Image (cartoon, rainbow, N blue to C red):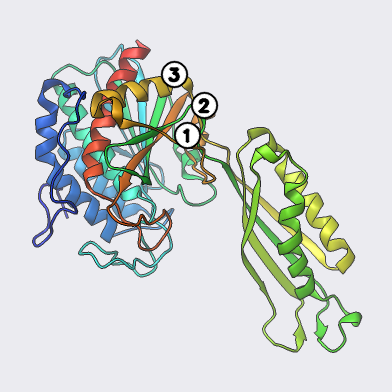
Amino acid sequence: MTSALTLPNGSHLASSAWPESPSGSQPLPFELDHLLALRVPGLVATRRHIHSHPELSGEEFETAALIARELSLAGLRPRMLPKGNGVICDIDGRPDGPVVALRADIDALPLTDVKDVPYRSTKDGVCHACGHDVHTTVLLGVGMLLAQLADLGELDGRVRLIFQPAEEILPCGSLEVIEAGGLDDVVQIFALHCDPNQPVGKVGLRVGPITAAADNVTVRLTGPGGHTARPHLTVDLVDALGRLVTEVPALVSRRVPANSGLLLVFGHASAGTRYNVIPSEATASGTLRVMDRNTWDEAPKIVAQVVRDVIAPTGATVDLEYLRGRPPVTNDARAIQVLTAATHAALGPDGVAETPQSMGGEDFSWYLEHVPGALARLGVGRSGPNVDLHRASFDVDERAIAVGVRVMVQTALRALAAAR
């Protein structure tokens, strides 16, 4: 695929019609709505190509190359991140204007795509099950439209497009972007994330924390091993592992305020290979999520103490690996004002929806440690039962692509105007 201009042969849009301009919405300047309408089939084709050719975190080289080609075709000058698996591209408007950044994550998940669609993943065990293909496509569309404004001399500053790798793993890809100068001179940063619980035409906004902090926890237990007939002569690691995964989560939650929303869940546990052999090693790994920033700061030492207290009576040796992940995404109030005005303009006043704080983690939070900004939730819900993020059958209503482009174009323009 060299250019996102037409849908592949035999492909059809996921929905029969694109949404009409909602009541109360405002047109984009300089007939950009007309240009967007012309670009929609190509954007859908791009999304489907990315969806069918997903790449895992840290391996997004072909995706980054596609992004760079599309931006170059729009007359822009993208630059690769040092590893070659991410892209930063400035759209230069008035040189004395502010710099506003828009970010999309581009990596996929280690899941097998089970959808029966023409754009099903062609890579076994790799799938865009979190909507990053949509995020990427939306930002490409935004770049195409804003490039037109820049050519007309109507862009009131500089807009930086950040196509970030490795959102789904630790260490986070956002830290690579920051290290590469992605936030240099930036006064505000914005992002969208797919939300299957909201219908197309709705954007979820919230001041303050909108996601939870998320860390990885791995516990390794060791002992001499032995015969199941004589557990008193050794250390029963299966018993110790059972205590770890059942007792530690509840006890950790008792060490913090209830409204901190701390949640420790083990997703993997393993010990032994034979029914009559007590193993010499056992492991459990999981995630710790917490809504409150102060509790997140205290979480590592709390978990370490509780694990030691629970395992000590068993006699097992404990090796705890606590990997700090990402703090909560905390939306700046002024940035939400910009997003609210932009959403009203793009979708009308009914386009804004209230959204709760999620227990999911998002490394967009690291950008907000350096500059103010906000993350919004883009409605992508399909007809029928919704499938949650990180499910192998996850898919979106593709009408959301055009909605996302309109919202983010309006956001960039309003952010530049407000920052002058």
Q: Quadrant of residue 144?
A: top left
Using the rendered image of the protein, determine whether residue 354 is visible from the camera's viewpoint: yes
Q: Quadrant of residue 373?
A: top left
User: Could you tell me residue 380's position as x and y percent?
Assistant: 31, 46
315 vs 333, left or right, is right
Name the residue located 43 percent from the left edge and 62 percent from the top edge. 110
Name the residue located 27 percent from the left edge and 53 percent from the top edge. 383
Of residue 332 and residue 174, the one placed in the foreground of this image is 332
319 vs 344, left or right, is right
The CA span between labels 1 and 3 is 22 Å
User: Could you tell me residue 395's position as x and y percent?
Assistant: 31, 56
First reached walking from the N terminus: tag 2 or tag 1 = 1
In the figure, 373 relative to 327: above or below? above
The CA span between labels 2 and 1 is 9 Å
Q: Label 3 crowding class (10 Å Cα cut-off): few <14, some 14-19, many 20+? A: some
Disc 2, SS: loop
In the figure, 398 relative to 155: above or below? below
Pointer 1 residue: 178
> In what quadrant of the picture does the C terminus appear?
top left
